[in-house]
Amino acid sequence: LKIDRVVVKLSGSIFKSKVDASDLEPFIELFSKLRRGGLKLAVVAGGGENARRYIRAARRLGADESTLDEIGIEVSRLNAKLILTGISELAYPSIPTSLSEVAGAFEEKGLVIAGGLHPGQSTNAVACLIAERVKADLFVNGTDVDGVYSKDPRVERGAERLSRVTTGRLREMLSKSVMGAGTYTLMDLVALSIIERSKIKTRVVICTPEALAKAVEGEDVGTLITPG
Ligand code: UTP
């Protein structure tokens, strides 16, 4: 089965607060290459370090939670804008602000770069919603770990990478907060629910251009999330 409609989530971790264009260029080259090869692609940028910094500062200044979410969204859109700047001749020319705008842009232009959309969710959830809306063949979730682990590999020893995991098992792991709050949220429950309800083929990989490319090529990298 040929993959020709893909959603890629770019981990916020690739957008350092000391932002460096050379970190982003290989991603931009990959997306250009994929689009030129005929793939339709939506890319969602995470908020990363700057989002966390801005949210922390705004919280200290007294902002309420939905305002903090809006700040996170703005930062993810700024990150998206950087990617767009490097790829503007091929992509939809602005950062969309609604799901329907993303869907229109995806069909029309075949390449759209987005950030967050609505308060109360993550950019992972946004990527899932886009995958659902555009009927993507594949959602590649680029994160700061190279797949789903049996335990949080950054805090526990003996964690094993799972090459496949069912949505049910993942839900169980999330609810037991094996992936503790704020520490290992490579998939939140909103995102997982969307993957479940629409059986979105999802692969979790480390967010490098090499791993993203392999995932799009259908290679067995990272962790495949399967229905069940
Ligand atoms: P992210 O979900 O991108 O956080 O958005 P992150 O930590 O960078 O995630 P990874 O590393 O890419 O997985 C940052 C914040 O922006 C707000 C939320 O507050 C989120 O924590 N946000 C983002 C929204 O409220 N709605 C959105 O649609 C997206």
Image: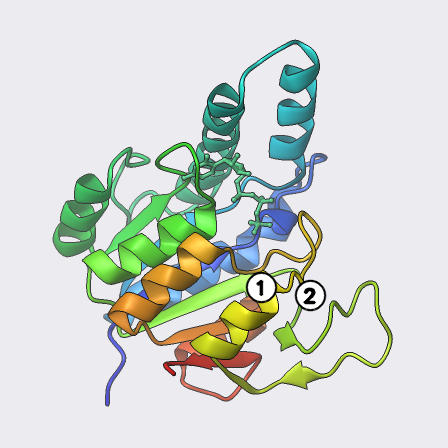
Q: Which mark is residue 223?
A: none
Horizontal side, residue 35 vs residue 159: left or right: left
209, above or below 83, in the image:
below
The N terminus sits in image quarter = bottom left
| Residue carrying label 2 | 178
- Residue 58 appears in view: yes
Is the residue under label 2 in contact with that under label 1 (CB below 8 Å)?
A: yes
| Crowdedness near tag 1: few (<14), some (14–19) or many (≥20) residues, C-alpha within 10 Å | many
State the image quarter where residue 192 is shown.
Answer: bottom left
Secondary structure found at label 2: loop
- Colour convention of the picture: rainbow
Question: Looking at the image, which is closer to me, 1 or 156?
Answer: 156
Q: Which mark is residue 174?
A: 1
Q: Position of residue 47 (x, y in %)?
A: 55, 39
Secondary structure found at label 1: helix
169, above or below 61, in the image:
below
State the image quarter where residue 35 is shown.
Answer: bottom left
